[in-house]
Amino acid sequence: MTQNPAQSAQPSGPQARRTAILLIDCPDQKGIVAAVAEFLVRHNANILHADQHQDAERDLFLMRVEWDLEGFTLDPEEFPRRFAPVADRFGMRWRLERSDKPLRVALFCSQHLHCLVDLLYRHHFGEFACQIPLIIANHDHGRRWADFYNIPFHLVPVEAGKKAIAEEKQMALLEEHQIDLVVLARYMQVVSPDFVARFPRRIINVHHSFLPAFVGAKPYHRAFERGVKLIGATSHYVTDELDEGPIIEQDVSRISHRDNLPDLLEKGRDLEKIVLSRALRWHLGHRVLVYDRKTVVFD
């Protein structure tokens, strides 16, 4: 009997650790690292990773700490109250995440499916620690891939002058499935400010250009017309400003005069898959801190 790959077992391996991740930004000053470490060790935390960054121009300190929950004596539900004195002392903005609470991710797509297929393949083989309860599309092209991977597919056409109606249907689906993160896998529609407001810093887009160059539609065509020597792709958080959200990841490929437009498109598709998958992996691992219009991505 031939088994559908969508129903095959995930690769087995050592059981992942249950960890907590603390993400912090605050004014830069002495004693922050020591205070955080002392608080965690006082509650028997086994710190697995710790990384930090100072932005000298903004006098800002950013930090990510991850520790094993095995043996940690402080109930995570009690963490906010107990950590508050430390946070208040240094003027921290902070959040606590858990590795054992995978995010629920909705994938949006249109007609170009290379990013969608790549994400589904990687998810199927265990690269992404998340759940994908649904795929939403404004064209039917992706349905066969959703069926292949046994993920519910919802076709929501976006008719001219009726985008608000389509977004109401989309947001109802996202609420029904308790979605934490939206990934626009070459979804060729501009989402409204109302949509963005529902998912602040929780919409990841891939743009087929090395932003801020060649924003908007058909960037490869414009790059080809300019005779560029490098093309790129960018994954970023979506904001109300088109293609201006905080950048998570970028990559480039060298171009020569021998490359024609189809060559640029082919190389661009490879870059898009790479930068989107990296951005999603880092977001799921709670490795991205956004400040102002920038990001820090911790190793």
Image (tube, rainbow, N blue to C red):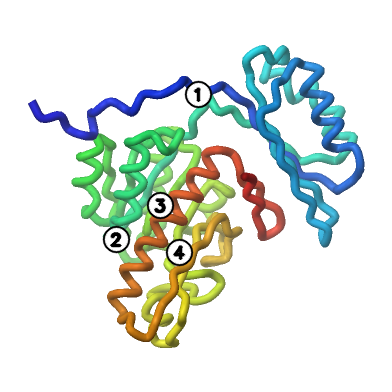
Q: Quadrant of the C terminus?
A: top right
- Give the labeled residue for mark 4: 207
Q: Nearer the viewer, residue 193 or 24?
A: 24
Residue 284 to residue 77: above or below? below
Q: What element carries label 4?
A: strand
**Residue drawn at x 43%, y 86% as measured from the top left:** 227
- Residue positioned most to the left: 1
Label 4, label 2: how far apart the Cα atoms are: 13 Å
Q: Name the residue under label 2.
A: 112
- Mark 3 or mark 1: name the one nearer the start of the chain: 1
* Residue 16, disc: 1
> In 3D space, how far apart are the residues under numbered discs 1 and 4 (Cα atoms)?
33 Å
Residue lying at 50% horizontally and 58% vertically, measured from the top left: 235
Label 1 or label 4, whichever comes before in sequence order? 1
2 or 1: tag closer to the N-terminus: 1
Q: Residue 192 location, x and y as percent?
A: 49, 58
Q: What residue type is labelled 4?
A: His
Query: Hey, what amino acid is under mark 1?
Result: Ala
Earlier residue among tags 4 and 3: 3
- The residue shown at (39%, 76%) is 220
Give the alpha-carbon distance from disc 2 to disc 1, as whole Å: 34 Å
Residue 278 picture location, percent across and down = 48, 49
Judged left or right of residue 264, residue 201 is: right
| Residue 34 horizontal/vertical position (percent) | 86, 32
Q: Is mark 3 on a helix, strand or loop?
A: helix
